[in-house]
Amino acid sequence: MNLWRQIRPLALRIYYLFADGPRAFEAAENSVADLSSEFSALFFQHSGRVCDKWHHYLPVYDRLFGPFRSASKEGAPIRFLEIGVWRGGSLEIWRKFFGGSAVIHGIDRDESCAALNTSDLPVHIGSQTDQDFLANVVNQMEGLDIVLDDGSHRARDQRKTFDVLFPLLSDGGLYVIEDTHTSYWWSYGGGFRKPGTAIEMAKSLVDGMHSWYHRFPVKRKMWAKTDVNAVHFFDSIIAIEKKRRIPPVRSNRGVDPFGA
């Protein structure tokens, strides 16, 4: 995965040149001007450690994480966990985005990332599928409000990590999985509508949210309808809101003009 991140800029340039002609690559580079968001500004002004992000993710971050940023300034610090820190640049930008009081930790399986560890931005070395390891990290963070899975991008790993960390999220927390286009790539354990990918898991969460209304018992495993408040789909990003819900209630107000 690290090798791909190093060669991806060149691969994209070759793709644009041969797939759509020279103008396609120029348009992709100029698309920066269309991204006017807080995170976009932080990203394009960043001069610290390397950070690799798709441009269309940047305004999505503002939309998803902006409310947490405001809440952190008004109350308890936000506890943010990034899985897959690579060169550490994203952690630095998250610090600027969430502010000095936020608790921000990173996880990576690459042992060389241990060199990125600081007291301000701790980096833990371990597998994103190791339940004990993940639980220990969350314990050190004294809780968890946001998870950003930018790890292996493999279907099985994404699912196992979600199974462990989503239950540990605080009420009102947010679980975000990046680069979900890999759900369609066989080399990452994916495939179109293949069971077990992040995309298909998120679809099942939508079914689980509506299990109040199912006419017949559903045999397949569903996530508790009282835990998942919303599921957001973006291009290559899935965001799942955790919030305990009560059974929906319906009532009438006002005067019936037909006197029924």
Image (tube, helix red, strand yellow):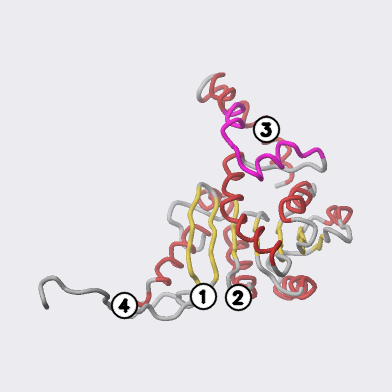
Q: Could you tell which of marks 3 and 2 lies nearer the N-terminus?
A: 3
**Residue bearing mark 2:** 167
Q: Mark 1 is on which residue type?
A: Asp
Mark 3 or mark 4, earlier in chain: 3
Where does residue 210 sit, x and y in percent of width and height? 38, 71
Pair 3/4: label in front: 4
Residue lying furthest top: 22
Q: Which residue is mark 4?
A: 250
Please give the residue where the numbered disc 1 appears in the rendered image.
227
Camera-nearest label, 1 or 4: 4
User: Residue 22, how many percent across, how many down?
Assistant: 56, 19
Please state if 117 lies on the left or on the right of 167 as rendered: right
Is 208 drawn above or below residue 183 in the view shown?
below
Residue 105 appears at what percent x and percent y? 77, 62
Query: Which of pointers 2 and 1 lies earlier in the amino acid sequence?
Result: 2
Q: Is residue 154 above or below residue 4?
A: below
Label 1 crowding class (10 Å Cα cut-off): few <14, some 14-19, many 20+? many
Q: Which residues are magenta?
A: 28-47
Q: Decide: marks 2, 4 in contact (CB < 8 A)? A: no
